[in-house]
Amino acid sequence: MRSSSVMAVMAIMSLGTAELPAARYAVAEFGPAACTHELRKGQDTASANCDLSGLNRSAGDLTSLLKQLEKSTDESARGRVVDAIGRMGPRAMAAVPKLIGEFRRGIPATVIGWEVNYLVEGGAALALSRIGPGAQAELLQGLNSSEASIRLRCLVTLTEMKPVDHRVEQALRSRVRNDSDGEVRAIACRGLGRIGHPNEEVSATLAEALGDKEVRVRMHALGSLQRLGAQTEEVVAAVAIALQDNTSSVRLEAARTLGGIRPARRQHASDVAKLLKADRVWERIAVACILGEMGPEAGAALGPLLDSIRSHDIYVVREATVAIRRIDPANDEVVRALLELADHSDPTVRCAGASGLGALGADGLSGLRRALQDADADVRVTAASALIRLSDNRQDTVPVLVTGLEDGRRHVRYAAAVALGEAGPEARTAVPMLRSLLHVGDEGMKSAVNKALLQIGRQ
């Protein structure tokens, strides 16, 4: 029986002229026979030679490839040459300076040119990583280049190599502290996290970077501190200061970093909780989630979380409720706060209260059942949706949801359809009304209705 590789080569050899570019890419995986066949057909000899060179891995072929790289002006052909050099592995050490030189070519203005050149530059980095640790000395030297693009690509390539030489860590720390280019400093911060050496010098360098003027540097420094699990007092103090950063994404990343440092949770939970007063809704929601993930050690945040609920911050009520229960499962104040919301004169606030009660589990059942009688359909549907998930008794909830399908507000109809689907076969009485909605509304609504019908079991 013929091997699969031989059969693949025969299949490639049977391709017509139109398919030859794809064939040239594939034959490198199957052997010289396919390359030889292409040479006989006379199609793009240089390209076929590139593939053959990568397979034979001889010094003579490397010399030939380097000459092709020097002469060729076609970016696609250059990319194939670079790939062939990389396939030679450590035997291509002599090509390292030339491959680093590929980083200097820059990005052409046209979109197509950008895509092609990106492949060439990315291929050079891949080829260097294939050559292995022997290329590190040249790459480290490349960090002294006056061109930021060269330094950047050398950094990226160095951090992908395994094993990592101690000189790489030293070079990364030096770039974080001294490089004039913000992107290089940012990638150096990221690299320190990726190489995984959580020593005090690395931690100190990353903590120092939290004062960098560039947002991306501060973000990558925080990300690397998280990855390394750095927990020194100096690191904790620097991250705590970052909670006051003037950029919201940095503040949130600092909060996550502190949340991942167990000894810091109890000490700084109240500092993280101050972000619950942020102007942006998504930031307040994210902070509530972070505090919940911190668990019992975030006890100092219970007061601010309860204040978020009592102050009618409707967008944060559910996340704040979940966080409180994770921090203190026996907390009763949250139940009382949510019941107060459920009795509010504003239906929007009552709806938020019902959503929070749904997050309480069994403790919220009585309040949710009462909310089924609310004058506002949005509140009723929110309560019924929660009860569908919390209780097996759907006798009272399905009729409420069916009525919700008739509401004039799209989000109410949508929520009702989703909840009816979750009720499964017990929501059969809703099928006629659901089917009627297939002929009206937007595609998102129709998709929710179709899914509900499938879950109920009738289409």
Image (spheres, rainbow, N blue to C red):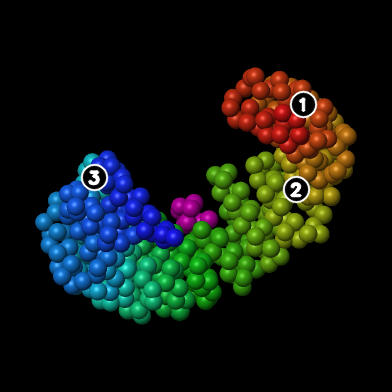
Give residue 431's mark.
1
**249 part of magenta stretch:** yes
Q: Amino acid at mark 2?
A: Ala
Q: Residues within 10 Å of mark 2 (few under 14, many from 20)?
A: many
Q: Say above or below: 203 vs 221.
A: below
Residue placed most toward the observer, 62 or 378: 62
Q: Amino acid at mark 1?
A: Val
Give residue 359's mark.
2
Give residue 113's mark.
3
Q: Quadrant of residue 398?
A: top right
Quadrant where the N terminus is found in the figure: bottom left
Q: Is residue 179 left or right of residue 238?
A: left
Q: Amino acid at mark 3?
A: Gly
In the rendered image, residue 355, in percent from the top left (x then y), is placed at 74, 41
Q: Which residues are magenta?
A: 245-252
- Mark 1 to mark 2 CA distance (whole Å): 28 Å
Q: Is residue 77 visible?
A: no
Element under label 2? helix
Q: Is residue 97 left or right of residue 445?
A: left
Element under label 1? helix
Q: Is residue 289 visible?
A: yes
In the rendered image, residue 218, in percent from the top left (x then y), is placed at 42, 61
